[in-house]
Amino acid sequence: MDERETVLKIENVGKKYILRQKAPYPVGGTKSERLKYNLSLNKTVSEDFWALKGINLEVKKGERVGIVGRNGAGKSTLLKLISRITEPTEGRIEYEGTVAAMLEIGTGFNPELTGRENVYLNGAILGMSREEIDAKYDEIVDFSEIGRFIDTPVKKYSSGMMVRLAFAVASTLNPDILIIDEVLSVGDMRFRAKCLNRMSDIANDGKTILCVSHMMNVIRDLCDRAIVLEDGRIVHDGDVEEAIRLYNGKSEGFKAGHYEYSIKNRVKGYKCDRLVIKSLDIVGNTDSVYKWNEPISFKFNVDAFTDEENIGMRLRFLRDDGVPVATAFIEPFANFKSGSRGDVFVTVEKHNLAPGNYRCSITLVKGRPYDIYNNIDSINDAFFITVLNVGSDEGGVVSDNAGRLWADSWGRSRITDVRAELKQGD
């Protein structure tokens, strides 16, 4: 039983938005219905969209809570409700103490004011006196590393500079609850590590941290509790590793090497009205565990709703923390007839992936696969694989000694087709 004080309590919270879109033309309607549509000035229809529904949550003092989920799951909406940027449609949110939030780049900053003036403005918003801000000012500037530009209007700052100053202000002014959205992905690696160390120090001082990130290494290193959101509802609250497994899609149903796809597997914007990837099966390796030189084979099912010619494909491999490491470009290989269904078989003979866990995404493209503006369908996290530090080297060596065969410091990508030549003069 956690006896720590509850600093944040969320009871049955929901957030509803009204979506408006153009009404479809009544192609099969009567002449009267078509005439009514043509004469109407307001050709829009509305529907209710619940970004969050039935959220119940308690956070204790000193907890470090990660919030993960796919794009559109409701993560940022939840943080905006907690930060009082917007009000819930239903339910109530209560918290103790002061809250500092970094939700979007530039949030809380006046672009016409200088960095120095924005420091004092944010301190005042947090309820601090000028004397208290004066005492913290030098520490804020030192941490942000933008001292030369502190008297420049922030509208002239780069996104990286904005993040540096925003995090320095939010973390140094000693809030009781610190809320961080995905903004740290903008910063460079060294400053990101500096921010993570600062957040650990804040939590160790008994403060509370809520962190949204798509980088699972951040969630794993920083948080002692994780929440998974899906379609605006909490589907997991507790163990961090279990949350990461759920986020990566590695539920028990996926371990057989079969995947079914719905709209939530796609980035918002795909209409799924031409070619639609319906499902995928791993071929010859249902455990999806490979040696580093072992071919990867799979097949996926496609429904065609229109005639499509010259279809190419991109196959992208990402680390389990979401960082891209390699992409295979497949030139146009298929034509589809409207109303047909087909299986696409793919074999990656040399993936050149170093040992580790990977998420793989598939994109069908009209024409050459390098053209990102002709995507027809795209599946995020289409399947998951693990590459072991075991395999045959060019010299025939087989080893499972990770320390000898592949060091973590060498990185994830194993590139073998490289040639070097030295020519010396007479």
Image (spheres, grey):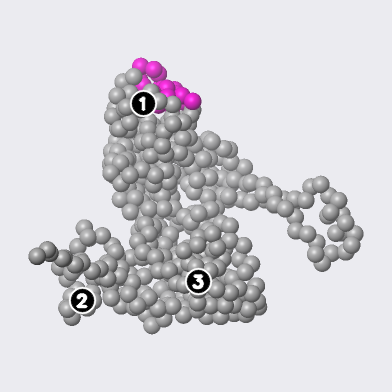
**Mark 3 or 2, nearer chain start:** 3
The reply, left or right, for residue 90 in relation to residue 320 is right
Please state the horizontal and vertical placement of residue 296, each as a whole percent of the image: 37, 76
Please state the horizontal and vertical placement of residue 422, each as a whole percent of the image: 16, 65
Q: Which residues are magenta?
A: 112-133
Q: Which of the two marks, 3 or 1, is nearer to us in this view?
A: 3
**Splitting the image into 4 quarters, where does residue 148 fall?**
top left
- Which SS class for mark 1? loop
Q: Nearer the viewer, residue 242 or 394?
A: 394
- Which SS class for mark 2? loop
**Mark 2 or 1, nearer chain start:** 1
Q: Nearer the viewer, residue 3 or 212?
A: 212
| Residue 84, numbered circle | none
**What main secondary structure does the magenta stretch of the protein show?**
helix
Disc 2 from disc 1: Cα separation: 54 Å
- Amino acid at circle 1: Ile
Q: Residue at x 30, y 68 (%)?
A: 353
Residue position for label 2: 393
